[in-house]
Image: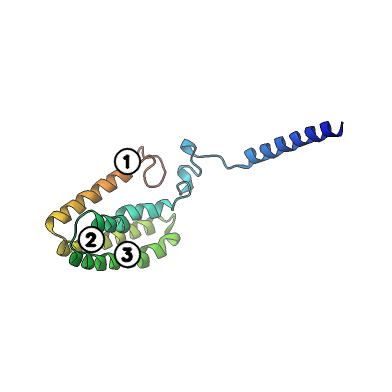
Amino acid sequence: MKKRMFGIVSVIIIFLMASVYCFTQAPGGPGGRPGGAAGGRQSGGPPAEMMMIMQTLPIDSSWGYVSFELGVSDEALVKARKAYKEAYDQRKDKIMSKMEAASGDAAALRNLKAEADKIRATLDAKLKTILTPEQMTKLTNWLKESSSRMRRAPGGPSGAPRSGQQK
């Protein structure tokens, strides 16, 4: 009798624990993703504002493409590294350090985007003096394709639905 009572109590406790677990989980957003469109973050990812800046100024992935895909000479690669390092430091100082404070402030985010555009233009100008015209064309095309892939991705860079948005 004690074994049977112990079994019944155990089943009830397991059922209650499972119920509490299921009912205390946050509801998912659109598409079952936590946070949804209003969450401001992708599932476990960086804030949407940061993703926007990274799409505008993809220093990390662009450097990888230049280093490994373009066949840049060693001498040119050293010069390109210096240009990328300057852009990386500017992004860190002028954008990333202000990102949290600008979150939710549309004007501040526009200013950060404009700053990212300036850094991108400066980097491009330096790269034009380092890379061959063919390499620069390949890099430009790769950046356009990369940006296009990011926009076409489900949910885009912010995780929010893309319908109704204008370029």
State how far apart marks 3 and 2 are (Cα): 13 Å
Residue that numbered label 1 is attached to: 152
Residue that numbered label 3 is attached to: 88
Q: Which comes sooner in the sequence, label 3 or label 2?
A: 3
> What is the three-letter code of the residue carrying label 2?
Ala
Residue that numbered label 2 is attached to: 121
Q: What element carries label 3?
A: helix
Towards the viewer: 34 or 136: 136
Quadrant of image for the C terminus: top left
Towards the viewer: 139 or 72: 72
> What is the three-letter code of the residue carrying label 3?
Tyr
Depth-wise, is mark 2 or mark 1 nearer the camera? 1
Report the residue at 67% width, 40% height from top.
20
Is residue 162 positioned above or below 111 on the image? above
> What is the three-letter code of the residue carrying label 1?
Arg
Is residue 75 positioned above or below 58 on the image? below
Numbered tag placed on residue 75 in the rendering: none
